[in-house]
Image (cartoon, grey):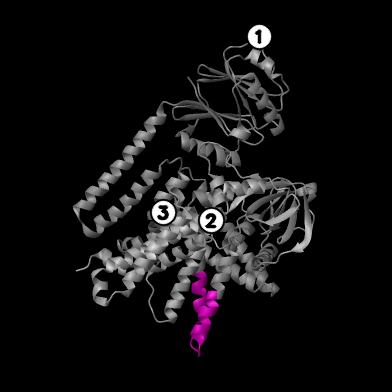
Amino acid sequence: MRSRTEIFLKQTPALKLLLGLVCGILLQEYVVFSLIQIVVGICISAAMFIVYSSLSLKYKFQVRWLGGISMFLIALSLGAFLLHKQHAGYREETLQKIRQADAVELIIHEPLEAKPKTYKALSKIRSIKAGDQWEPAFGNVLIYFSKDSLPVNIGMGTHLIVRKPLQLIENAGNPGEFDYRTYSRRNGIYFRTFLKADEYRALAEKTVSPGSYVFALRDRIIGIIDKHIHSDKARAVAKALLIGYRKDIDRDLLAAFTNTGVVHIIAISGMHLAMIFVAMQYLLTPLRKRRHGKAVSAAVTLAVVWLFTFLAGAVPSITRAAVMITCIIIGSMIGRKTNIYNSLAVSAFVLLLADPYDLWDVGFLLSYTAVLSIVLFQQKIYRSLYFQNKIMQGIWNVVSVTLAAQTLTLPLILYYFHRFPNLFIVSNLFAVPLSAVILYMLAAMVILSAVPLLGNLLGVAAEKLIILFNGMLQYLNEVPFNITDNIRINFMQAILLFALIFLLREVIHTKKRNYLYASLMAFAAIVSIGIHESRKHSDQLKLAVYNTPGNIVIDFMEGKKSFVVAKEPVARNSSTDTYVLKPAATYFHTKPADSLASVHLSFPEIKFHQYHLFVLNAQASLPPIPSTGIRLVLVADNRREDLSRLKELFPNAAYVFTNTNSLWKIRQWKKECNALNLRCHSTALDGAFITEVN
């Protein structure tokens, strides 16, 4: 008798290919094979499959493992090849050549996005000029145009000649920060540039791509929403809910969605596409009863599904759902039932073929783990309680789906976001059904906008519902225990947590003690690692000066407490708080404190235990006599001082040049420091300054 695993693998042939592809991508990323090695691997695995295919049925059965292994190895080699191809175009010598080019021709690839002081756009490199010759090149560049000098004729498809050297995208160098450099490179974006009017020239030539028509349709939908919905916050949520356009949502409202566990509603997920699919199935019911109606219905449904997918930016979560719906529709057309696990594997395989770096995309991982979790756990959770009341059954069904989705996504949420929304069940109870009503209402408003009366009525109704929706979320966000923050788990703990979840599922399913013992061991390992990490940081005594544009932010860490002193106050949920202080607190295992007894502020001097630092800004007065106790001097506000004189006044000090200084001045100071044998550090050029306090 075949085992459950054998039966499952036979029913999901795409899973073997997906596992092979994933293994190939991971091996190429962390081991790195040459093109010759990959080609040899493809040839050997293909030869194995040809040999297996040429065997008679009798021998095929005896060595049936050979077919599976050969297909796995082909997929593995393919994964390695795809990633090698991605790497090949971005070797260091190629990047250096682009940086050293006399001029670069760029094509703006998407509509301009308004920022507080600039317009941002993604562009593609078409060619570079070296000497007198133009030669083809490729790659993506983030452009930031100064708002006060942007010509009206610049937009998507515009060709630009840029004579300013492109900058490589680098991280800020703050502890625990999001690795934006790697994220950008995995999206093919290696450069950025900030342009003033005299640093580029727009050409008459324009490129019209298929994407421009999608963006034009998206802009038209945005215009309809702007016309019929007047509240700024309601309008922003409407755009996010209908087409995934989240750029207008303010930081506080986005925090409310995140903290209450319903950010998936404005992230455009499979839920949105499922609602559209259900609506299309209902609307096209009369058509399917006619001759060739099924085929026409399937074609129309697929067209609408994929149009919505591209309107929403073709993000992994919705593309996965679109591929799965396509599999379901094609399967029903040819009279075959689709296996949900096989459909999941096929959609993941297709997405990774298109972009192997999706494997590191958090949205991709959350999307697939959420769907897999619902498939694995929802029915078991739903059947654990029975209600005779139909309303209670409906409520319990929503709760069971929410609980199931959270089960497998929990390790990813804790590992990547270090927080857990405690009220996710309550928020999803009203958010899921209410968002469905709003989505259908917004779709109807867009379709019927040509009829002013109907468009206005639907717009008013949708706006009222969105305001109610936002109000309920913001109310829940104000509840003191709405979120558990600063949760710290490392990669090994996340893997062990996945193992624990699957082991507990097997304990419930099989009632075998071996799985129970294994789950207890996994739990003990998670706790042991957590205790070890906690003890490692309990006695720390550190000082950090962060890389924060236009500000000086100093963090004094004593054990698990953190006290921050800043030139300009750091507001809650500001960019500095969100992207610098919170990641640093997670990295150092600290919690913010209002004060520390060991920190004495007496500007321009600050004393932290026996460690003294001096803040040399525009207002600071230098001491009249040398001070041997000063260990660190923070130079700010482009202070004009002779470094040789500072060396005499602070003979034992190291120098940190903060972000409040000009870059040209910092580079000049660093050269002088090298000549005087002074220890120096620039937060803008070298990242955060971190030191142990002895």
Numbered label tally = 3
Residue 452 is left or right of residue 489, and the answer is: right
* Dot 1 and dot 3 residues touching (CB under 8 Å): no
Is 211 located above or below residue 291 in the figure?
above
Between label 1 and label 3, give the one nearer the viewer. 1
Q: What stretch is highlighted in magenta?
A: 274-302
Residue 579: x and y in percent read 56, 41
Residue depicted at 23% across the width and 75% down the height: 58
| Membership of 77 in magenta stretch | no
Residue 159 is left or right of residue 497, and the answer is: right
Q: Which amino acid does label 1 sit on?
A: Ile
* Cα–Cα span, label 2 and label 3: 29 Å
* Dot 2 and dot 3 residues touching (CB under 8 Å): no
Could you tell me which secondary element the residue under label 1 belongs to?
A: loop
Q: For mark 3, does the 10 Å Cα neighbourhood hold few (<14), some (14 to 19), or many (20 or more) residues?
A: many
The mark nearer the N terminus, 2 or 3, is: 2
* Cα–Cα span, label 1 and label 2: 60 Å
Residue 654: x and y in percent read 59, 21
Residue 420: x and y in percent read 44, 47
Q: What residue type is labelled 3?
A: Thr
Q: Identify the residue position indicated by label 2 in the image.
A: 86
Q: Identify the residue position indicated by label 3 in the image.
A: 409
Q: For mark 1, does the 10 Å Cα neighbourhood hold few (<14), some (14 to 19), or many (20 or more) residues?
A: few
Please name whichever residue, 274 or 134, is drawn nearer the observer in this view of the structure.
134
Q: Identify the residue position indicated by label 1 in the image.
A: 625
Q: In which quarter of the image is residue 70?
A: bottom left
Q: In this view of the protein, can residue 422 be seen by the observer? A: no
Is 292 located above or below residue 4 in the figure?
below
Please name whichever residue, 167 or 51, is drawn nearer the observer in this view of the structure.
51
- Residue furthest to the bottom in view is 291
Is 29 located above or below residue 377 in the figure?
above
Q: Which amino acid does label 2 sit on?
A: Gln
